[in-house]
Amino acid sequence: MPLFWSPRMAMREFPSCFGESGVQVFDSSSGSSGGGVGKSAQNMVACLYRTRLSGRYCVIGVTWSKNLMGQGLSVGMDDPDGRCLCKLDVKPWLFSRRKGSKRFEVESSKVDIFWDLSAAKFGTGPEPLEGYYVAVVIDHEMVLLLGNLAKEAYRKTTASAPSSKAAFVAKREHIFGKKIYCTKAQFRDDGQDHDVAIECDTIGLKEPCLEICIDKKRVMQVKRLAWKFRGNQTILVDGLPIEVFWDVHNWLFGGPSGNAIFMFQTCLTAEKLFPWSTSQGLSQSQFQDVGFSLILYAWKHD
C-alpha cells in the first residue's frame, strides 16, 4: 500500500463549510460500511471548483442533496486553510423558494450567489439535469455558472464575463448496482464527458475480479482481488494519465451492506498531490497545481 493512500486524504480536503453536506471520511480499517457515510449521505453529490478571491485561490463547493422532503442545495466558499468564508443553504423543506439570491461581504469583496431551480428537471439522483442555473458572482464577475440557462443567469445577475472562470477540481458521488456501477466523468476541465463503468462480482466466486471500463473500453483489470482489495494503478484517458485508487475491503469482508470506494485522480507527482498533513492547508502554489479528483462510493443493491 502506498504511503500516500489518497482517497482518505483527498476527501478530508473538501470544504469545512458543509458539515454534514461535506465529504465524510471513509474508515476502511473499521470494516463497517459507514465510516461516516450513512444512508442519509447516499443521496448527495458534492463538487468543488477553484477560483480566486482578493488575489488568492479559494474553493467554491456546491452540494446537491435529496431526501423525503425534496431536493436541497448548498453553496459555500472556503479558503485554502479550510476556513469557511461564506455559505448558503437551500433546505429541502424550504424548496418552495426555488429561486433567489444572497450577498456576502468577504475580505472586502462582494460575493453574490444566485439560483433558479423553478423549472429544474431531475432524474433519479440529486443533481438537476436541465432547466436551472446556479451562479456565483465575485465583484460583478461571473466566476461560476452551472446549468443550461446561461442567458437567464447573465440577465438576472447583470454580471460580466470573468477574466478566468472557476476550474472544476473535484467531485464526490454515490453509485449503486449489483455487479456493474456506472457514472459519467469529466476528467479535464471543459473536457468531454466519459462513461465510467466499474464491474465486480463478489458473490459466490473464489477469485473475484475488478474491471474498470471507460467509454465501454476496458482500461484496468485486477485479478486475485481478495489479496489486492486495496491498491492503485495508472490508466490513460485521452492521453491523460489518471491514477485510480480502490478499496473494496467492505465488498469482500464487510457483509452485504458494505460499500467500496474509488478515486480517479489526474496525475501530478506524488509530492505535489499529497505533501500536506490533514491539519494543514494548501499553499497557493500547491493549490494551483492540484488536479481533478472523482471520488465514488459504490453501494451494492440487496
Image (cartoon, rainbow, N blue to C red):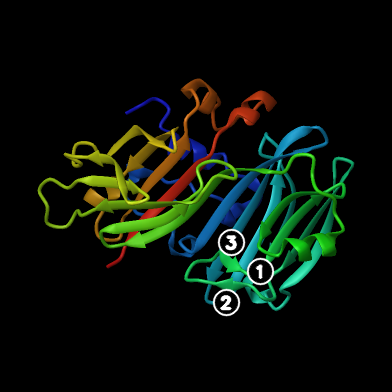
Residue count near mark 1 (Cα–Cα under 10 Å), binned few <14, some 14–19, many ≥20: some
Q: Please indicate, yes or no, whether residue 281 appears anywhere in the rendered image.
A: no
Q: Could you tell me which quadrant the C terminus lies in?
A: bottom left
Tell me the number on the disc at residue 91: 1
Residue of label 3? 64
Q: Residue at x 74, y 57 (%)?
A: 135
| Residue 247, horizontal then vertical, whole percent | 33, 42
Q: Residue at x 85, y 50 (%)?
A: 160
Q: Secondary structure at mark 3?
A: strand
Q: Determine the image quadrant of residue 288.
A: top right
Tell me the number on the disc at residue 249: none
Q: Nearer the viewer, mark 3 or mark 1?
A: 3
Hey, what amino acid is under mark 1? Lys
Q: Secondary structure at mark 1?
A: loop
Q: Residue at x 76, y 32 (%)?
A: 56
Q: Determine the image quadrant of residue 168.
A: top right
Q: Given contact means CB atoms under 8 Å apart, are the residues at marks 3 and 2 in contact? A: no
- Position of residue 117 relative to residue 109, above or below, is below
Instruction: Compare marks 3 and 1 and give the one earlier in the sequence.
Output: 3
